């Protein structure tokens, strides 16, 4: 999944955020895809929300509705069925950092620069960024980074446990692809159950008395037929009773991406918003 507005350093427009939500819904229904790399085109992961775009939105829409687009995109990435691996390079700013934090695993290049400049711009960090960062970094570090707006580099982000790995710039995308491929080789049910359980636990850790908590999902009991199938094939999906299939490489144009698999031709196409999906 590629943020594809390189001329704007992949600034997040309203249309791009809507396309992220739509793409995640499509991925939820495409059960053969087990891992997705999230990255930015060109020189940056993302410069954050596009101020010019949000100023030009429909005047009839409420500021709350406009601000909610980012929260919906971040939640879609958090809850999407496949595992998500963020490959972060260049600049990762504000809302872009919130989207990266929504991914399951995060790799960054050695020269990446992070920052959260919202307070200097006179606005609070939105999109659910505060509770998300508190869960990832803790309250004191979140306050420092959000209130001071100071930039920080890959080594500090790794020390704060925001990143799983820091890799050489020219190896970032290869390393992210290799990690996604490694994850995709594992049984679907175990991947999905682990992701859901960890997400539920981290939400509970940051919950307050006024914040509803989400219980860990129950572990479904496979039917005898599915259990027998899994005995002969450990990669059988417990939800469908079918074996996992590899995905094929997709064809891509400059503005439109079509993703296909070895099953009966599911596809996702985007047109204008700045999001590309390919495998």
Image: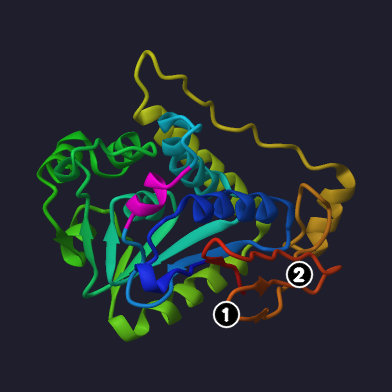
Residue 101 covered by magenta stretch: no
The residue that disc 1 covers is 254
Hey, which quadrant is residue 191 in on the image? Answer: bottom right
Q: Residues within 10 Å of mark 1 (few under 14, many from 20)?
A: few
Q: Which residues are magenta?
A: 48-57
Residue 99 coordinates in the image, percent (x, y): 41, 52
- In the image, 242 versus 146, the foreground residue is 146
Above or below: residue 196 compared with residue 273: above
Please report the residue visible at 11 percent of the width from the left and 53 percent of the height from the top.
150
User: In the rendered structure, which disc, 2 or 1, sits on the residue that comes first in sequence?
Assistant: 2
Check residue 127 in the rendering and tell me which mark sits there, or answer none. none
Helix, strand or loop at disc 1? loop
Q: Is residue 50 visible?
A: no
Establish if 232 lies above or below 132.
below
* Residue 45 in picture, x, y percent from top left: 36, 67
Residue at disc 2, secondary structure? loop
Using the rendered view, name the quadrant where residue 148 is placed.
top left
Badge 2 is on which residue?
Answer: 245
């Amino acid at each position: 999944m590629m943020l594809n507005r390189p001329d704007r350093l992949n600034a997040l427009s309203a249309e791009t955020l809507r396309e992220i939500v739509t793409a995640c819904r499509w991925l939820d229904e495409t059960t053969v895809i087990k891992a997705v790399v999230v990255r930015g085109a060109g020189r940056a992961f993302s410069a954050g929300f596009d101020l010019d775009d949000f100023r030009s939105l429909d005047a009839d829409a409420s500021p709350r509705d406009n601000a909610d687009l980012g929260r919906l995109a971040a939640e879609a990435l958090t809850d999407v069925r496949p595992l998500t691996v963020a490959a972060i390079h260049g600049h990762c700013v504000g809302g872009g950092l919130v989207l990266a934090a929504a991914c399951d695993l995060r790799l960054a290049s050695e020269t990446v620069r992070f920052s959260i400049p919202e307070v200097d711009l006179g606005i609070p960090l939105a999109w659910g960024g505060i509770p998300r960062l508190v869960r990832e970094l803790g309250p004191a570090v979140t306050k420092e980074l959000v209130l001071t707006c100071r930039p920080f580099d890959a080594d500090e982000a790794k020390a704060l446990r925001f990143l799983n790995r820091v890799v050489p710039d020219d190896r970032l995308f290869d390393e992210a692809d290799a990690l996604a491929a490694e994850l995709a080789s594992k049984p679907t049910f175990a991947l999905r159950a682990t992701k859901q359980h960890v997400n539920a636990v981290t939400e509970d850790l940051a919950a307050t008395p006024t914040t509803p908590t989400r219980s860990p999902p129950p572990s479904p009991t496979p039917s005898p037929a599915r259990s027998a199938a899994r005995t002969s094939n450990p990669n059988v999906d417990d939800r469908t009773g079918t074996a996992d299939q590899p995905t094929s490489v997709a064809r891509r144009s400059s503005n439109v991406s079509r993703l296909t698999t070895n099953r009966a031709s599911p596809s996702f196409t985007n047109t204008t918003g700045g999001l590309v999906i390919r495998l």
